[in-house]
Image (cartoon, rainbow, N blue to C red):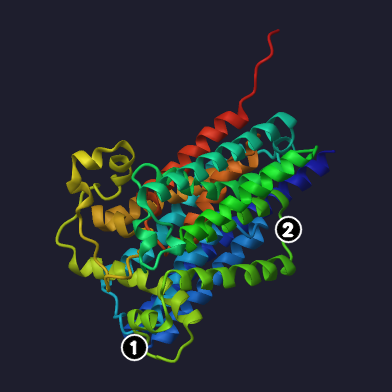
Amino acid sequence: MLIRCWTNEIIAWKGNDMVQAEKRVEYISYSISYVLAFTASRQGLAYLAGIVLMLEALFLYLINLRRTGSLVDLKGLFSLSWIGGEGIACLQLSRLQRDWELITWICFFLAYFFFLLGYDLSARRCSAKAENHRNAKVQGASRARRVMICILLLSIGSVSCFLLEALVLGFIPLFSPEPHAYSYFHISGVHYFTVSCILIPALSVLYVKLTEKWNVFRIAALAVGNLLAVGIPILCVSRFQLLFAVGFAAVVYLMLYRHVTWKMIAAAVVILIPVYVLLTVARRHNITYLNGIFEMKYSKMPIFITQPYIYVANNYENFNCMVRQLPEFAMGLRMLFPVFALTGLKFVFPQVAAFPLYTTKEELTTVTLFYDAYYDFGIAGIILLASLLGVGAAWLSSRAEKSSNPVVYLFYGQIAIYLGLSFFTTWFSNPTTWFWLALTFMMYLFIGYEKKELG
């Protein structure tokens, strides 16, 4: 018995030592790759700089995949998205792109470095208390019923608000000849509920895992709810909402079942790409129009390559544009915008929404996750937000392993999307993000409530 205990201690020590060694490799590899990419870019070797960063992003993702066994590990997703996105941007395939400022390079480096630091420090504290209750959290007929109630309420609320907006505004974007009709399909306060249907597919994955009994009503409710979750984004001509709904459900599925086949991936690609293309056509955006906006150096490059490229690369260019042109910091007002929007204070203080958006082109308004952090506080804002995201990601990863409440997966799924699309927009300065998180918290309380027995 004593020998067995000693053996277990040695194995645990070696395992912990290996984990620490892998963490050191992450810091060292990332720093060396970044210096190489910066040097290559300064020497005009754009392709080399891009390839170095893309390979580093893949390397860091694979390290975390090996450590956790999860395709949707939060640290892995962020490294793949943020650093990989930088690598894509470094290729400079568009005339809109230019060499980044030194401050831009520093900000991009610190964003991942302090995320990594915050994550590792927080993970060390969380790991000591981690317990696995995976089986407990997916049991309980009462919780399955509550999940179904949430699906029904979201379905009714979303379709009701969509119809209200269509009646008041007098059009549906999919059937409107206006190229930017989707931008005008919005009633303040109401649209948050309209687009909340994107939570339904992820809830459906939870329900399938929790329920043990099926009947015609439950099957019909799931079918209708998921049709709405796909149909409303299509009617709104929102590619993002459609991809978010599918991606969100996929993350929750991977967390619950932890397996995926190439057939599933191929089926998703075969279905989503045509839908994405059709929604682009529905926006009245033809190839000539898009190529004119993107200003690709190689004009004959296929649109299905140029569009994803510019939607990743130009976001980093917009950040660099802001670094060059920003006259003064907003001192927190940009990132506090959700407070002003959700409380209605933006109508009392309209100046909070009057800050200019610095972009390379008027039509290309997407930015990175850290755009507003720099806009508010400069490099200090980057460090603060990155550290908080790292701490939060580590805590949520630990919580997903410990909590008996299945709705924790909905939190995890949303944060996974935000980190996995860190190149896309300022998620945490967006009121809709916080509205969805608030809805999820309400469902967390409702579904996880346990009535105490009187003794």
Helix, strand or loop at mark 2:
loop
| Residue type highlighted by circle 2 | His
Give the image location of residue 307, x and y in percent: 44, 76
Count the numbered circles shown: 2
| Residue type highlighted by circle 1 | Gly
344 to the left or right of 232? left
In the image, farthest residue toward the right: 1
In which quadrant is the N terminus drawn? top right
Residue situated in front as seen by the camera: 185 or 123: 185
383 to the left or right of 415? left
- Residue assigned mark 1: 44
Mark 1 or mark 2, which is nearer to you?
A: 2
For the residues labelled 1 and 2, the Cα–Cα distance comes to 43 Å
Give the image location of residue 187, x and y in percent: 35, 47
Helix, strand or loop at mark 1:
loop
In which quadrant is the C terminus drawn? top right
- Residue assigned mark 2: 259
Label 2: few (<14), some (14–19) or many (≥20) C-alpha neighbours in 10 Å: few
